Image (tube, rainbow, N blue to C red):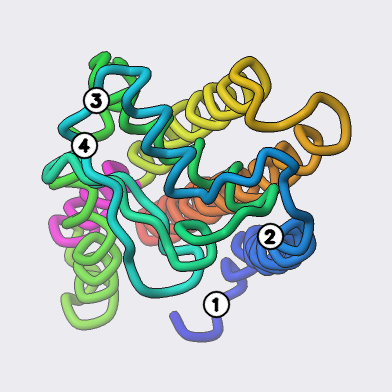
Amino acid sequence: MFYDPTYVFLIPAIIFTLYAQFKVKSTFRKYQEVKAASGRTGAQVAREVLDRGNLYDVPVELTPGTLSDHYDPRSRVLRLSPEVYHGRSLAAYGVAAHETGHALQHAESYLPLTIRNGVFPVANIGSNLGFFLFFIGLIFGGGNSFLIDLGIILFTFFVFFTILTLPVEFNASNRALAILGNSGYLAPGEELGGAKKVLNAAAMTYVAAAATAIMQLLRMLFIRGGRDD
């Protein structure tokens, strides 16, 4: 199990994940240094966009950490990292608008987001427990097919969640670019193009996460099939 050849399934996904993490950090740092001509902070952009969408009751809060920005659908709170909350850069605008995109999705009951939120509790269990049960069934259960199959089923929910995340994130980024361009926060050309590069780099991390989950599931199925031979 520890040195089996099926690890080859994960190598491309791991390399892609490392590249995606490098790309999002380097791109964010690059455009964090490029100030937007409109002069607003990321928090101001987020607040104005939320108000335009009649989401006056969604607060914009400061949260610690780097690239820790997120919209919390349970509390209906938009949280921005210090670099984005106080920032006046192209990177700050892109991330702030992206997170407001999620708030707008939630308000509109955007279907992929609704399904993803519904799947999340089981997916969260699957990501933590699925492979553990699979491992226990394989190693300590004498090839216990029930534990192996249960682990695969639970992990499949996690894979489904990562796939559902892609249209949610892509849509939020498309909304962000439309908001930034159409509302005059960023000028067409270099400003809007810089924000787009930041969002594209961020999207790559979600693609990498989905690819890794899919390859892990394929590896589990391959091992499961080998036990039946």
Q: Quadrant of the N terminus?
A: bottom left
Would you say the residues marked 1 and 2 are in contact, meaning their CB atoms lie under 8 Å apart?
no
Measured from the top left, where is residue 206 in percent x and y?
Answer: 53, 47
Find the distance from the CA under tag 1 to the CA under tag 2. Answer: 38 Å
Is tag 2's residue or tag 3's residue first in the polypeptide sequence? 2
The residue where tag 3 is placed is: 55
Looking at the image, can residue 16 be seen?
no
Residue found 45% across the figure and 57% down from its top? 85
The residue where tag 4 is placed is: 58
Question: Helix, strand or loop at disc 1?
Answer: loop
The residue where tag 1 is placed is: 4
- The verdict on residue 147 being magenta is yes
The residue where tag 2 is placed is: 28
Question: Helix, strand or loop at disc 4?
Answer: loop
Tag 1: residue type? Asp
Would you say the residues marked 4 and 3 are in contact, meaning their CB atoms lie under 8 Å apart?
yes
Q: Nearer the viewer, mark 2 or mark 3?
A: 3
In the image, residue 181 above or below residue 11: above
Q: Quadrant of the C terminus?
A: bottom left
Q: Main secondary structure of the magenta part?
A: helix
Q: Nearer the viewer, mark 1 or mark 4?
A: 4
